[in-house]
Amino acid sequence: MQSIGIVGGGIGGLALALACRESGLTDISVYEQSPGPVAEPVAEPVASSHGIVLSPNATRVLYALGLKEALMDAACHSDALHYRSHRTGYQISMRPLGAFAEARYGAPFCQLLRSDLTRLLSERLRERHIDVHYDWRCSRLVEDSEVISLTFDNGETRRHDLAVGSDGVHSHVKRFMHEEVAPTFTGHVAWRGTTPVADLPAQFNSHPMTIWLGPGRHITHFPVGDGAQLAFTAVVETAEPTEESWYEKGDRKTLVEQFQDWHPVIQALTGASQNLHRWPLYDRAPLARWTDGPVTLLGDACHPTLPYLSQGAALAIEDAWVLSRMLETWEEDVASGLAEYERYRRPRAARVQVGSRQEGRNFHLSDRWQIRWRNLRMALSSRYLPEIAMERYDWLYGYDCVKGFD
Ligand SMILES: Cc1cc2nc3c(=O)[nH]c(=O)nc-3n(C[C@H](O)[C@H](O)[C@H](O)COP(=O)(O)OP(=O)(O)OC[C@H]3O[C@@H](n4cnc5c(N)ncnc54)[C@H](O)[C@@H]3O)c2cc1C
């Protein structure tokens, strides 16, 4: 294979370009519809940024791509993940992260601003002399004698041996190979924002990552950047039908109202929040296939993942590594490389999608007895069986595609 055209310069597309470069490919082009490096998958740039948690299954790939130092400079780390009850603040359970997780999985958890993650990927690509074409929106794909022509809104056309659609949940490239399947609104809306630590009660100074669980909603917060900001994601179940859009600006008053009967700490967090945006969360049926001739998909374009396990970007990064290695291994037979890529990645992505849905249901329980049973199980395992509590997640965080993909 001579050349690869990557449509979509989000986290997955940038990671793929870098992984392909590291595996020896030189003719790599990334086409991104936004006018500049994007922190969020939207058509217009978001002035501010939100937080992202990267788990060891993703950070080990970024390490392998030579980003260890840059990632450590940009990221914050929490020693533990605390689960708390929404009204009393009672600590239900605790999972060790920090050194414990790093020793167990060989790579750390980290938290950073999404804009920092896309910046460090873009900088590395520049060092490797790979251009990302910003303001290039792909609108048409035509297959012609095993070559794929990409046409862009600016009138340009480019031909590649392989096109990869890393263009997110509303993927245009996906439409090339599948009939559009209507997405289903999950009834959940995610709010994301940041709050300056200085505006919060002193208890936030210790910075543990925390998930507060309440009926029909939850909120996760963690420090980002130099630790002066807390990033948070709040997910709320709502009966209101919502237009499908990637994000819209959020109104602080509405967010505060939705958490008004929660612990005072959460009221402080929402009350001083900034950079608010809200995402209606949509789910899609699994695709029958990811590849059609010289076109394949990666990341949210083929397996959008609900955010309850914080895994969507991690999966896109894993996809990027595996696809690049398959293209390297099957250099003379791209079709077999793409078939192998799907074979390795589809079961993994499906398992994470299902696991994320289950975690969401568990977080949002509203029946009093079910909540007590859940809390008891979580408390017992964290107090007496932390190893076993962590073992539950070994399949997720211990997945090491850098070593091999069985
Ligand atoms: C509330 C929330 C919290 C989350 N938290 C986490 C977390 O903590 N950890 C985690 O791992 N994941 C998290 N995720 C999931 C994660 O954000 C996504 O899974 C990830 O961004 C997917 O990356 P991607 O590159 O596949 O797609 P995207 O990030 O959607 O990128 C697609 C890119 O393609 C571009 N594009 C689209 N169409 C075209 C076109 N026609 N031509 C050219 N370019 C185009 C877009 O502008 C965009 O830049 C969260 C998601 C949500 C909603």
Image (tube, rainbow, N blue to C red):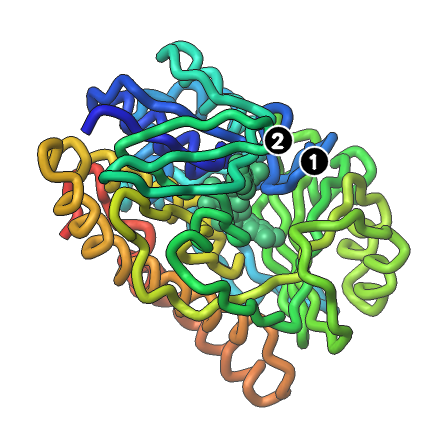
Q: Position of residue 346 (x, y in %)?
A: 28, 59
Residue nearest the viewer, comparing 273 with 198? 273
Left/right of residue 169 with respect to residue 318 in the rendered view? right
Q: Is residue 191 above or below residue 106?
A: below
Camera sees residue 318? no
Which residue position is annotated with label 1? 44
Q: Is residue 3 above or below residue 374?
A: above
Q: Quadrant of residue 265?
A: bottom right
Label 2 sits on what residue type?
Ser
Residue at (42, 41) in percent of width and height: 109
Q: Position of residue 226 (x, y in %)?
A: 62, 25
How far, Cα to Cα, is label 1 from label 2? 6 Å
Label 1 sits on what residue type?
Glu
Which residue position is annotated with label 2? 34
Residue nearest the viewer, comparing 336 with 381? 336
Residue at (40, 55) in percent of width and height: 302
Left/right of residue 309 with respect to residue 273 in the rendered view? left
Camera sees residue 320? yes
